[in-house]
Image (spheres, rainbow, N blue to C red):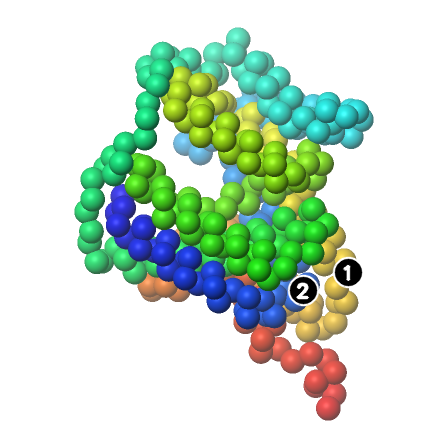
């Protein structure tokens, strides 16, 4: 891992965050709704890979894996719809805990890894050393440009599912926070971080969007990271359990985007924007090898279905004139 290149890339993302505000006029509802839908749709293959047992697993797609994923999915669905109070809000957690417990007698949880993990481990500054190579800077910069695009989409998605009108400054702050996290993480031996778009689906399912809760959860995660045995218990969670929850969470994000698009007037122009960006975004997601031959920064921008679809939506929104303009 090129720690210094990652840090430099993060600084560029922080710098770009100060130019997000004037660019937000290029993100009308037809663009943001499409991007939010793409976030959920492009993540669905990940959820199904989890449900099948994880890419490369010997029992990929086995009936056992599918049954566990379906059971977790069903538990979350029923508790979220018919549960009351904390039961409904904690439906995702309850479903995953039950799924985890089911997997234990089936021999799907590798507790040996817990025994190998240390009880306490503090972060080590530059654990992997400091090695700067200029040839890695450009790829990292390209990667962070993709991250900026995706973070804007995630912030818009959060605003949609929380029914909060996100200001341009809110979105810029989100990009800035993402960059700051990626700047700090290499110092303590981690890699770059990014906004985790999968978590957007937790908000409508838990019915909780409290910043205080998010801060407390963050503190808990930091504390857990200091005790590897506890963090390992979580990390060895079988993939089908994650898949059952992921299908519902990612689907919720996609549905939020469709809800946003339902308020958009589907003129010929808007239809072309939605169709083109979704078609290319999903195409890149399903056939990522298609973009592997693209040179330099173009390859980075089209390495993700979210960034590819967002880029197409932004460009078409700029170059396609609105109907009233064509009539003049």
Residue at the far front: name it: 212
Q: Secondary structure at mark 2?
A: helix
Q: Secondary structure at mark 1?
A: loop
| Badge 1 vs badge 2, beta-carbon distance below 8 Å | no
Residue at the far top: name it: 105
Residue 312, given in percent of the width and then of the height, sits at 54, 66
143 or 73, nearer to the observer:
143
Residue 107, given in percent of the width and then of the height, sits at 48, 12
Residue 182, given in percent of the width and then of the height, sits at 39, 47
Measuring 46% from the left and 49% from the top, which residue is drawn there? 178
Measuring 55% from the left and 45% from the top, which residue is drawn there? 197
Judge from the rendering whether residue 47 lies leftward or rightward of residue 82; answer left or right.
Answer: left
Q: Earlier in the sequence, mark 1 or mark 2?
A: 2
Task: Kindly identify which numbered label has been placed on residue 49.
Answer: none
Q: Which residue is mark 2?
A: 30
Residue 144, given in percent of the width and then of the height, sits at 40, 56
Residue 61, above or below 165: above
State which quadrant residue 208 falls in: top right
Local crowd at mark 1 within 10 Å, few (<14), some, or many (≥20)?
A: few
Measuring 74% from the left and 52% from the top, which residue is drawn there? 259
- Image quadrant occupied by the C terminus: bottom right
85 or 256, nearer to the observer:
85
Measuring 65% from the left and 21% from the top, which residue is drawn there? 94
State which quadrant residue 186 falls in: top left
Local crowd at mark 2 within 10 Å, few (<14), some, or many (≥20)?
A: many
- Image quadrant occupied by the N terminus: top left
Q: Which residue is mark 1?
A: 263
Residue 88, above or below 158: above
Residue at the far bottom: name it: 328
């Amino acid at each position: 891992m090129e720690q210094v290149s990652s840090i430099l890339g993060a600084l560029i993302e922080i710098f770009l965050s100060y130019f997000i505000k004037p660019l937000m006029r290029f993100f009308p509802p037809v663009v943001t709704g499409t991007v939010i839908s793409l976030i959920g749709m492009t993540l669905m293959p990940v959820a199904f890979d989890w449900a099948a047992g994880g890419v490369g697993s010997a029992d990929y797609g086995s009936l056992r894996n599918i049954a566990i994923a379906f059971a977790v999915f069903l538990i979350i669905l029923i508790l979220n719809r018919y549960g009351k109070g904390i039961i409904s809000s904690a439906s995702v957690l309850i479903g995953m805990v039950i799924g985890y417990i089911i997997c234990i007698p089936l021999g799907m949880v590798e507790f040996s890894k817990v025994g190998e993990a240390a009880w306490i481990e503090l972060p080590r500054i530059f654990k992997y050393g400091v090695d700067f190579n200029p040839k890695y800077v450009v790829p990292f910069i390209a990667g962070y440009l993709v991250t900026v695009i995706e973070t804007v989409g995630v912030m818009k998605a959060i605003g949609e599912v929380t029914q909060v009108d996100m200001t341009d400054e809110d979105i810029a702050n989100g990009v800035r926070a993402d960059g700051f996290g990626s700047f700090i993480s290499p110092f303590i031996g981690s890699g770059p971080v990014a906004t985790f778009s999968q978590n957007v689906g937790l908000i409508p399912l838990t019915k909780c969007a409290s910043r205080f809760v998010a801060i407390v959860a963050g503190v808990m995660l930091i504390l857990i990271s200091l005790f590897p045995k506890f963090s390992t218990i979580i990390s060895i969670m079988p993939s089908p359990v994650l898949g059952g929850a992921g299908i519902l969470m990612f689907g919720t994000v996609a549905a939020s985007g469709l809800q946003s698009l339902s308020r958009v007037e589907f003129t010929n122009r808007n239809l072309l924007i939605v169709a083109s960006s979704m078609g290319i975004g999903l195409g890149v997601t399903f056939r990522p090898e298609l973009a592997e031959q693209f040179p330099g920064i173009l390859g980075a921008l089209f390495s993700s279905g979210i960034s590819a679809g967002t880029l197409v939506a932004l460009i078409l929104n700029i170059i396609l004139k609105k109907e009233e303009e064509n009539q003049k």
